[in-house]
Structures are given as C-alpha cells and as structure tokens.
Amino acid sequence: MIGTTGLKSLQVDCIVGIYEHERQTPQTVIMDIDLDYDFAAAAGSDAIADAVDYDAVARGVTELVRSRAFQLIETMAEETAAMLLARLAQVRTVRLEIRKPAAVPAAACSFVRVERVRA
C-alpha cells in the first residue's frame, strides 16, 4: 500500500546564496517535500511509530538548512534529500522542491526540484 506523505510550503528562514548581502541576512526558502513509503503498517496500527512523522521531518529539514548556510539551493536540495533517506528507513522515494522567492526580482521565485530513490 504505497502512499505519499509530506509537507507543502514549509518555510525556513536561513542564510542561502552566493552574494554578500545573502550571506548577511536570512531569507525565506519554501519547500515541498513528498515522501513515498508503504502505509500498510501505519494504517494497520494507527500508530505514529509506524508512520513517517512529518513534524519530525519539518524539524530535521529546518535544522539542516539553518545550520549549513548553503550557497546554492541545488546543494541544499541534494543534502536534504540524502538526509531524509538516511533518517527514514521506510521511505522509498523523496521528491523535493525548494523555492527562493527573493532570488530574482522579476520572478515569483527561483527553484530546484529533485527526486531521489533509495538504491
């Protein structure tokens, strides 16, 4: 019973970017995180211990992004996807989009999107 859980529009204020002003002042990144896993155990037990705890996902992602002060959102995406696969043994696939609203004044946002599948 494969299903998807995750977070839409998780907002994290962090240092991200290559320009001096970006290295001085936190800015918001917005993340959509999709995690595919087998829901059978969680659906059968109705227990969080058998499910992906998306509150813990939000805390882990926020901690990583704030602590690393990435220059590129590409690196942020790769490290975030790798961290989620490492921490969540039941997850088979991570899909992640990171948007940076303040990157280009003439655009709503810049973004990167990755999909990583457990080997």
Image (cartoon, rainbow, N blue to C red):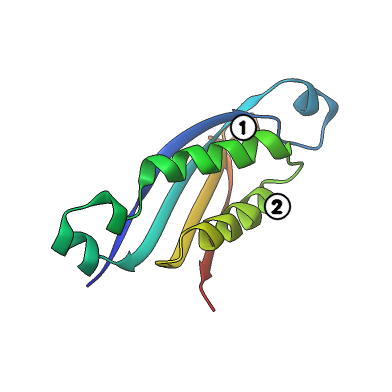
Q: Quick check: 37 above or below 111?
A: below
Question: Is residue 43 positioned above or below 112 on the image?
Answer: below
Q: How many marks?
A: 2
Q: How dense is the environment of label 2, judged by Cα within 10 Å: few (below 14), some, or many (20 and up)?
A: few
Give the camera-side residue of 100 and 38: 38
Estimate the spatial distance between the alpha carbons at disc 1 and disc 2, rounded to whole Å: 24 Å
Amino acid under label 1? Ala
Q: Which mark identifies residue 13?
A: none
Q: Position of residue 114 (x, y in %)?
A: 55, 61
Q: Which residue is mark 1?
A: 106
Q: Is residue 13 above or below residue 48?
A: above
Q: Check disc 1 and report its element: helix, strand or loop.
A: loop
Q: Relative to the observer, which residue lies in front, 55 or 73?
A: 55
Q: Residues within 10 Å of mark 1 (few under 14, many from 20)?
A: few
Residue 47 in percent (x, y) is at 21, 52
Please indicate whether residue 41 sits to the left or right of residue 103 in the image. Answer: left
Image point 51% across, 73% down: which residue? Answer: 118
Residue 24 picture location, percent across and down: 78, 21
Given residues 86 and 34, the one toward you in this image is 86
Residue 92 in the image, given as x and y percentages of width and height: 43, 70
Question: Is residue 17 toward the left or the right of residue 110 in the image?
Answer: right
Please identify the quadrant where the N terminus is shown.
bottom left
Instruction: Point out the frontmost of discs 1 and 2.
Output: 2
Please state which amino acid type lies under the numbered disc 2: Thr
- Residue at horizontal 77%, vertical 41%? 71
103 to the left or right of 55:
right
The residue closer to the viewer here, 25 or 46, is 46
Q: Which residue is mark 2?
A: 75
Is residue 73 shown left or right of residue 88?
right
Give the structural element (helix, strand or loop) at label 2: helix
Q: Residue furthest bottom?
A: 119
